[in-house]
Amino acid sequence: MNAAPILELNQVSKRFTWRLDIASRIANLMGAGLQERAVHAVDAVDLTIREGEVVGLVGESGCGKSTLGRIVAGIMDASAGSMKYRGKGLAEMTPEERHTCKLAVQMIFQDPYASLNPRMRVEDIIGEAPVAHGLIRRSEMGAYVEGLMRQVGLDPRYRKRYPHQFSGGQRQRIGIARALAVKPQFIVCDEAVAALDVSIQAQVLNLFMDLREQLGLTYLFISHNLSVVEHISDRVVIMYLGRVVESAPTEELFRQPNHPYTQALLAEAPRLVAERRDYTPIAGEIPSPLNPPPGCHFHPRCPHATQRCRSEAPALREIAPGRLSACHLNDR
C-alpha cells in the first residue's frame, strides 16, 4: 500500500440552510417569529486516506456520513474547509486536472434500482460516460461494455436489457460497472450492500476486494453494518452527529475501542457467541442536527460525561500511533 495520501479533507463542513420564503416573511410581519434554520450535517471533519487503502466510515443514521461521501465524490460542495486530491486542491488545478480528478473519484449508491435510469438499456448506462468524456469512441462502446460486464460478473449478452429485468444484486453490479467505466482510482461506496440479501452481500464484497487487487482502487466504504466494515476495511472512522470521534486500524478498533460512542456501538453489535448477553441500547436518541448540543456532541448520552464535556468540544488527536480519538477522557 502506498503511504502517500490520495485524499485529504481539512475542516470540511456542510450546512443545509432552510431560508424563509415570502409566506414566512409575511407571517413574521404578523408576529410569527419564524427563523432561518441550518442543519449541521458535517462539522469540521479532518480525514486523510492513503492510496490503496479501504477506509470504513461508520455511524448512526443522520450522522452525516453519506453527506461526507457526496462531498468527497464531488456531488456536493462543502460549506467550509478544503479537500485535496493527490496533494492539490481544486482551486490549484488546471481545467484538465479538475476534469481528471472528477473522473478519478466515483460513487456507488445504496439503492441499485433508484440509481439507474429505468428508461436506458444497460449498455447505455455503462457506456454513456466514457463516450461523453472521450475515453472511447462510440463505435467501441459495445466491446468496452461487454468487457466491463464480464469484469463485474454479468453476462454481456444481457447488455440490451433494462434495469428492471435484473435482480437487486445484478443491478448493483451494473452500478459498479458504470463507476468503473471512466477508469476511477477512488470509489465512494455509500451503503453499497445494505439493500442486498446477506448471501448476495458476500458476493459483492468479494467483488469489491477483487477489483481492488486488479485495479489498485482506493475505497471510502460507508456503512452502518459493523460486520461488513470489519470484513472489508483496513481502517475504520467513526462519525457522530457530523464529527469524526475516532479513527483506528480495523483490528485495533474492534479489539480495544477508545471513544465511549465506539465502545457502545461495538458492545451492541451482534456476535456469534454461545454465552448469554444483555443488550442495553445507547441511552437517549441522537440529538437534532438543527440544534446540536454544545461541547462534545455525545455528552447527553455518554455515561462518563463531565462538566468539561458539556462546554468544550474535544479535539481529534493522536492517542497512539495511527489512532485518533476525540474524548476528554484521554487527558486523564
Image (tube, rainbow, N blue to C red):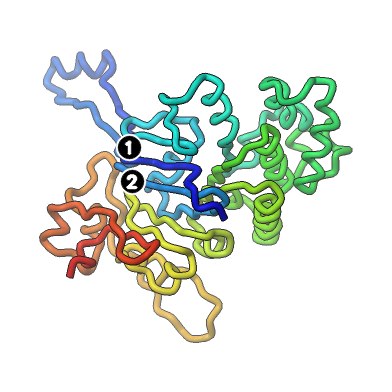
Dot label at residue 216? none
Disc 2 to disc 1: CB gap under 8 Å:
yes
Task: Tell me what residue is drawn at x 71 percent, y 39 percent.
Answer: 177
Task: Tell me what residue is drawn at x 53 percent, y 45 percent.
Answer: 190
Q: Check disc 2 and report its element: helix, strand or loop.
A: loop
Residue 11, horizontal then vertical, whole percent = 31, 40
125, above or below 9, in the image: above
Residue 88 or residue 182, whichever sits in front: 88
Q: Check disc 1 and report its element: helix, strand or loop.
A: strand
Residue found at the very far right of the displayed protein: 157
Task: Tell me what residue is drawn at x 28 percent, y 17 percent.
Answer: 21
Residue 64, horizontal then vertical, whole percent = 39, 44
Residue 23 or residue 268, whichever sits in front: 268
Q: On the image, which quarter does residue 272 sit in?
A: bottom right
Residue 141 or residue 197, whichever sits in front: 141
Residue 198, horizontal then vertical, whole percent = 65, 60
Task: Tell me what residue is drawn at x 21 percent, y 58 percent.
Answer: 300
Q: To which residue does mark 2 refer?
A: 242
Residue 23 or residue 215, whichever sits in front: 215
Dot label at residue 13? 1
Q: Is residue 111 left or right of residue 303?
A: right
Q: Amino acid at mark 2?
A: Gly
181, above or below 277, in the image: above
Q: Amino acid at mark 1?
A: Ser
Residue found at the very far bottom of the displayed protein: 275
